[in-house]
């Protein structure tokens, strides 16, 4: 029986196909967060008026000489280490020749045979994959094609072949009917290209890989990672291994270019899988390792479209970049880059769950960004109950940030504010209801919880005498509900408690009030 095919064009494999496997490798282009462009002093910034951040170097004018930015190489090394790569002690730049109207020089400065980073890996958590793609599932591929085990505990291991440095091209603008324009501001923008082994086995894995890489590189400050702005783009190389008549056939490789959303990656791979299956049965093409089709993704139509074909790397006519000397990368340089990586998101999630007793969902949410994770961790350290600090951040603070459309770095309170509020509730100085009022006042004014509690006179009454008075008044004023409770309607107790808290203006200590009310009613 064939494996279940992903959603896409209508296609069902014939009975002659025993099974098939999807084989995917990704090439991710990622813009780095340097102050200047890769080989000149022009500002590295998106947007703005067209052709205002250019110079003879990034325009490729005759006689202009590129100069490598040290920050560019260092941030590339940081990204490589975050993705578990080794850093080359010796590397160089090359020229890759091809014609695009927005590539001013007619060639791209890149790295060919001596990339800065090699032999890395990324772990994809099985919890984020559909059940059929986890170990034991119907679509699970247990071993990478190269024979290396791909499972490490609760994760699938995707190998990274290389990460190399290169510059971006400009941008073509198709506006005003049949007119096209070129904005060269993006020329020379520093990029890394992350190239994986063909270890990805489904459309969902491809999307999850891109999402995981984006998260890691954002954590280490290597990129903004905004796919919709073009900070990251993914080219997917995909083909199939098909079993038919006891033999294995490989379909030709398709390279789907410039996918700029997780959904586009997933849908393009799913569609191309079915398209290649249909082609295998109706117009079988031979596999050649040096040949691939370059495809585009038509998001509106939901289908891949052919753009061009290429036979091999010879088409690019790689030569050593003559204007930039090969260079050594020192151990001090590598140590400096390594110091910028720090604890990565998945490691934080594991530690947060173990150290603070958080659920998978809570840990995932609190580690969405390094800034939020560090903010929570400081609040947890200062509070008597880290779990309650997490709950305040998850339920109240994040909702407020979303409503105000601001980030955790822009909020006017600190982790100490949340910790102080949690401690005030734990120590019985305010009730949970009062704490919400204190939280709202903190966000509005930036004042400490202690100051707001004193200012508003919100201190909890814990003295038994005053609370007994509230209880006795409520019981005297509500004989009907009291009788109902004694006749077995246990839910009335909660209503009476609410009346006690209301009578006290919310100041009565709930635990003390509950105990006294229970004693009075004999429950």
Image (cartoon, rainbow, N blue to C red):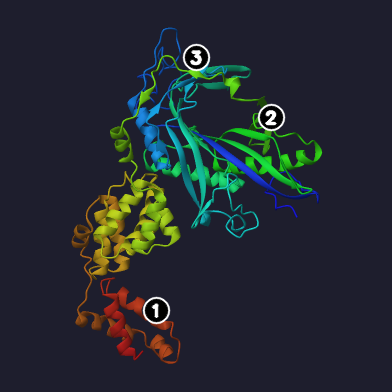
* Secondary structure at numbered mark 1: helix
**Which residue lies at the image location 55% right of the left edge and 42% below the top edge?**
262
Camera-side mark, 3 or 1: 3
Up the image or down, 236 lies above or below 55; here it is: below
Across and down, in percent, residue 161 comes to: 50, 37
Q: Earlier in the sequence, mark 3 or mark 1?
A: 3
* Secondary structure at numbered mark 3: loop
**Which residue lies at the image location 31% right of the left edge and 30% below the top edge?**
330
Quadrant of the snapshot with the C terminus: bottom left
Classify mark 3: residues with Cα within 10 Å, few (<14), some (14-19) or many (20+). Answer: many
- Mark linked to residue 265: none
The one of 214 and 459 positioned closer to us in this rendering = 214
Across and down, in percent, residue 44 comes to: 39, 25
280 left or right of 298 in image? right
Q: CA distance from mark 2 to mark 3?
A: 26 Å
Q: Dot 2 corresponds to which residue?
A: 306
- Mark linked to residue 495: 1
The one of 257 and 240 positioned closer to us in this rendering = 240
Across and down, in percent, residue 198 comes to: 58, 41
Q: Earlier in the sequence, mark 2 or mark 3?
A: 3
- Mark linked to residue 105: 3
| Picture mark count | 3
Q: Earlier in the sequence, mark 1 or mark 2?
A: 2
Q: Taking the image as drawn, is residue 399 in sight? A: no
Task: Check whether the beta carbons of the residues at disc 3 and disc 1 lie within 8 A of each other.
Answer: no
Across and down, in percent, residue 522 comes to: 34, 91
260 left or right of 118 in image? right
Classify mark 1: residues with Cα within 10 Å, few (<14), some (14-19) or many (20+). Answer: few
Q: Quadrant of residue 353?
A: bottom left
């Amino acid at each position: 029986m064939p494996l279940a095919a992903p959603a896409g064009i209508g296609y069902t494999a014939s009975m002659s196909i025993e099974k098939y496997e999807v084989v995917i490798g990704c090439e991710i282009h990622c813009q780095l967060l340097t102050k200047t462009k890769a080989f000149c002093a022009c500002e590295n910034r998106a947007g703005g008026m067209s052709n205002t951040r250019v110079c003879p170097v990034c325009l490729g004018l005759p006689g202009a000489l590129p100069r490598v930015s040290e920050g560019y190489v260092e941030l590339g090394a940081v990204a490589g280490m975050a993705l578990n790569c080794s850093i080359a002690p010796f590397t160089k730049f090359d020229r890759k020749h091809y014609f695009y109207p927005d590539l001013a020089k007619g060639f791209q400065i890149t790295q060919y045979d001596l990339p800065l980073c090699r032999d890395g890996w990324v772990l994809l958590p099985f919890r984020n994959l559909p059940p059929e793609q986890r170990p034991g599932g119907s679509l699970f591929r247990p071993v990478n094609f190269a024979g290396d085990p791909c499972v490490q505990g609760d994760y699938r291991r995707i190998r990274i072949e290389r990460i190399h440095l290169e510059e971006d091209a400009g941008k073509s603008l198709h506006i005003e009917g049949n007119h096209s324009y070129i904005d060269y501001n993006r020329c020379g923008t520093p990029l890394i290209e992350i190239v994986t082994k063909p270890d990805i086995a489904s459309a969902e894995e491809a999307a999850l890989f891109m999402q995981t890489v984006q998260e890691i590189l954002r954590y280490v400050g290597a990129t903004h990672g905004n796919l919709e702005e073009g900070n990251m783009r993914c080219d997917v190389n995909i083909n199939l291994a098909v079993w038919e008549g006891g033999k294995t056939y490989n379909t030709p490789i398709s390279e789907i270019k410039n996918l700029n959303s997780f959904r586009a990656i997933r849908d393009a791979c799913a569609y191309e899988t079915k398209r290649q299956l249909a082609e295998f049965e109706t117009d079988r093409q031979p596999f050649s390792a040096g040949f691939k089709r370059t495809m585009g993704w038509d998001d509106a139509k939901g289908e891949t479209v052919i753009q061009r074909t290429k036979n091999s790397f010879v088409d690019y006519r790689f030569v050593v970049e003559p204007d930039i000397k090969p260079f050594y990368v020192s151990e001090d340089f590598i140590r400096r880059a390594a110091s910028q990586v720090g604890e990565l998101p998945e490691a934080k999630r594991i530690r947060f769950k173990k150290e603070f007793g958080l659920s998978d969902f809570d840990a995932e949410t609190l580690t969405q960004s390094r800034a939020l994770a560090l903010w929570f961790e400081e609040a947890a350290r200062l509070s008597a109950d880290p779990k309650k600090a997490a709950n305040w951040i998850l339920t109240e603070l994040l909702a407020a940030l979303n409503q105000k459309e601001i980030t955790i770095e822009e909020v006017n309170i600190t982790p100490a504010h949340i910790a102080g509020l949690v401690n005030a509730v734990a120590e019985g100085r305010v009730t949970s209801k009062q704490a919400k009022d204190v939280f709202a006042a903190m966000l509005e004014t930036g004042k400490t919880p202690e100051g707001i509690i004193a200012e508003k006179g919100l201190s909890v009454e814990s003295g038994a005498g005053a609370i007994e008075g509230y209880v006795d008044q409520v019981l005297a004023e509500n004989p009907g509900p009291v009788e109902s409770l004694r006749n077995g309607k246990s839910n009335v107790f909660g209503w009476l408690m609410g009346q006690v808290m209301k009578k006290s203006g919310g100041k009565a200590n709930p635990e003390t009030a509950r105990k006294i009310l229970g004693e009075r009613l004999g429950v």
